[in-house]
Image (cartoon, coloured by chain):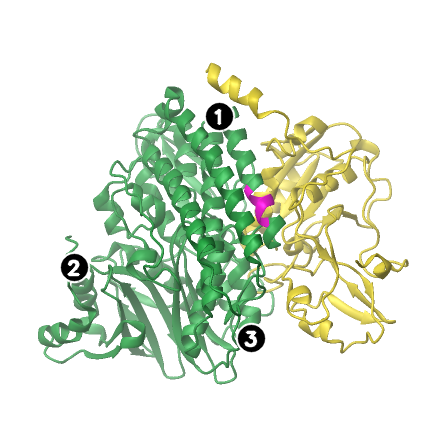
Amino acid sequence: MSLAPTNGFRWLDLPKAVAGLWQGRIESSVDESKSTVSFECPPKHLQELCTYLFSTEGYSFATLVAEDETFEWVLRYIFYGGPGAGQVHVICRSPLSEPCIPSISPQIHAADWQEREAEDLFGLVFEGHPRLGDFVLHEEWPDGVNPMRKSFDATRPYAHRERDPKWQPESILEARGAFMMPIGPVFSDHAESAHFLLETVGEDVLRSIPRFFYKYRGVEKIAEGKKVDDALLLAERFSGTSAFAHSMAFCQAVESLCGTEAPARAKALRVLLAELERFRHHVAAIAGICSSTALAVAASSAGILEEETLRLTGRFLGHRYLFGLNTPGGLMTDFTDEQCREVNQGLWRLLENLRTLQDMLRFTSSFLDRLEEVGMVSQEKARSYGLVGPVARASGISRDLRISQPYGHYDGRFKFHVPREEEGDGYARLRILFSEAEQSVNLVNQVVSSLPPGPVRVPLSFSAGSALGWIEAPRGAAFHWIRLGPDGRVLRYRVMTPSFVNWHGFHLAAEDFAFQDFPIIMATFGLSNAECDR
Amino acid sequence: MLKWVRKGIQTGIKTTAYPPGAETAPGVSPGRPKVQKWGEADTTHPLIEVCPTGALTGADHRISVDYARCIHCYRCRRQTPTPMFWDESFEWAESTERNEALQSPFSRSLHIRFVDAGACGACLSEIKQLNNPFYNIHRLGFFFTPTPRSADVLLVAGPVTDHMRLALKKTYEAMPTPKRIVAVGTCALSGGVFGPSFASAGGVNEILPVDVEVPGCPPPPLALLHALLVVSGKAQPHGPRVSPDRDESEDRR
């Protein structure tokens, strides 16, 4: 699988190339304002076209948006390229009575979980997919119930069948003394709910089988029929530790749909707030790694930094987790230049302490021993799973939407560096977190020194249509796709999050390791189950 | 290793004075709207319209706040020409009517079992802060315990998703009596923005009997600390949730 260089490749040439390869059997349309090419692809060419985009042209798979319209299924496969390569939407239609679509997972492994999700929630069948069933909906849901279908009533509680509390998983491993160690969904500390089955022969764990969606709140479903302002609350609150990033992606999608841009001051402030959130997230992840290795003083130091960042945010910007700031058309409130300067100065002080911590950790061999060559993810695997964010960047893939799909004020006016490490182990991921935190403070500094004056909000008039919003959230690329009806209410809302994508690849890192390393591997991934489960 | 010892000492003491003192550092609480008097207040007041969750209600020339519904969206503060006054308090934990003598068996140390029943991560993060040096709950004899068998308090956050329902019940049943349940955050009190729906129950009370409620989205660590103090009888719970008798609009600054 080769990643073709996208240098000089222009997304505008793509329709011609595709028309040549498939002799006009695939219709294309171009939206220059959104740097997007759309292909209307009949199901029989779907695999070929997606494979061509992924393997030959080097596009990454973003998300699969399924919709059941009155007469047909509309499946939208969204791909995104490197700098200058724009986005590609592959649209595949099938009559409502035929929910069978060829699977693209055998060629594009990154689509594996997304197809399983669509199978569970919509009742679509992906022909050729190696493993369908039992994914989002757990065993208390009877077969044939598909909550994302338009006909399903989401407002009322659903009467489940009783779950068998004595249920035991079957072991696959056949060896002397082999057993299966279940962990979760309730963990021994205050970790998020998820379930892991560790197949072990004693100290060594050979593989881990994760199970998620214990926290499935059906965000995409309950957003349907809501007004934009109410759906925004869901976008903001389904993952509290990256609330600003997701609400910003949601707002950008709505703004793009309405053809309105947020004012310059709002865009600049959004960069400041998004980077502040990234800084806080990374400090929290570092604190998590320190405490997973039981290095008490370092864990306390990082904990102090995390709480100080929260207090800094609360003091000058209102909410400690940046809730209630984004709104379609800009920001709900303006901050004075003085407030922004205070935040900037506060961040520099915190960064200084963070650097001290990093220097001390770098020379603590007992700490490094527990991270180096632990939880390895190779570059090749990271690419085939389409991993994103700090996890991908620690495995040699410098994928960052701020560079490859510029949005808002990340249009080249601020200089920053996207760190990259080659090793793909826990220590590489830790180093990425440290250097990204530093880059975020750097960005905040640039924003504060060039804050444009003016309003922070423009009024929007909602119109029917659909649009995609995206953001490089603290954990990686996030995509929000929204369709509004003529009454300005949400018809379909699709969220793809970095935690979903990276948990898919987690089992790569959790293979053949010593049992006590499990919390460390989890901590170095730094993922959120709320963000994954939605 | 010596450098870590030195660093620990150099950092000094960060721990909050609360309790018994007051915490005055800025940014420890997101604040929340305050029940207040409003001349023309009736059911169609613009402030009530702006609230997306129905937490604000008007009656008797007064705007009341249902904290079990307030999600700190700031719309009554930032999206109206006549903003509500927000206070920066944090002693938010309320005792439900179930237990009159909450404190009796729990006046010494508390062992806490936490269950994430679909929380977004913000409540969880604030719970995690309880162990950092600023709040350091160990000093008060509060501990997180890995097993429900030795837990006194069940701390639950999230709207209780259908998939977590069984795990939550089993955890509760595994705890010895007497036991207390603390529901953390607006989602755990009313479902918040998520429920009730096809996938979540809309609050812990739908499944288990809650003893102490901590409203907030998320409640700051000090509010959680207050809740634990209420369970152990070392602090008084916050007054009734809606419409206190005294008029707090006098406090407006």
**Cα distance, mark 3 to mark 2?**
42 Å
Q: Nearer the viewer, residue B91 or B100?
A: B91
| Residue A503 in view in this figure | yes
Asked whether residue A312 is drawn in magenta, I would say yes
Q: Residue at x 62, y 54 (%)?
A: A318
Magenta highlight: main SS: helix
Classify 10 Å Cα crowding around label 2: few (below 14), some (14-19), many (20 and above): few
**Cα distance, mark 3 to mark 1?**
47 Å
In this rendering, do the residues under marks 3 and 2 share a single chain?
Answer: yes
Asked whether residue A330 is drawn in magenta, I would say no
Q: Nearer the viewer, residue A325 or B222?
A: A325
Query: Is residue B6 shown above or below A235?
Result: above
**Chain ID at mark 3:** A
**Cα distance, mark 2 to mark 1?**
45 Å
Q: Are marks 3 and 1 in contact (CB under 8 Å)?
A: no
Q: Which mark's residue is nearer the viewer, 2 or 1?
A: 2
SS for dot 1: loop
Q: Quadrant of residue B12?
A: top right
Q: Indicate the position of residue B129 as horizontal and vertical percent values.
A: 60, 38
Q: Are marks 2 and 1 in contact (CB under 8 Å)?
A: no
Q: Amino acid at mark 2?
A: Asn
In the rendered structure, the answer to whether residue A96 lies left or right of residue B224 reads left
Determine which residue is flagged by label 1: A294
Instruction: Give the magenta-colored segment's residue range.
Output: A309-313
- The mark found on residue A227 in the picture is 3
In this rendering, do the residues under marks 3 and 1 share a single chain?
Answer: yes
Determine which residue is flagged by label 2: A7
Q: Residue at x 28, y 55 (%)?
A: A110
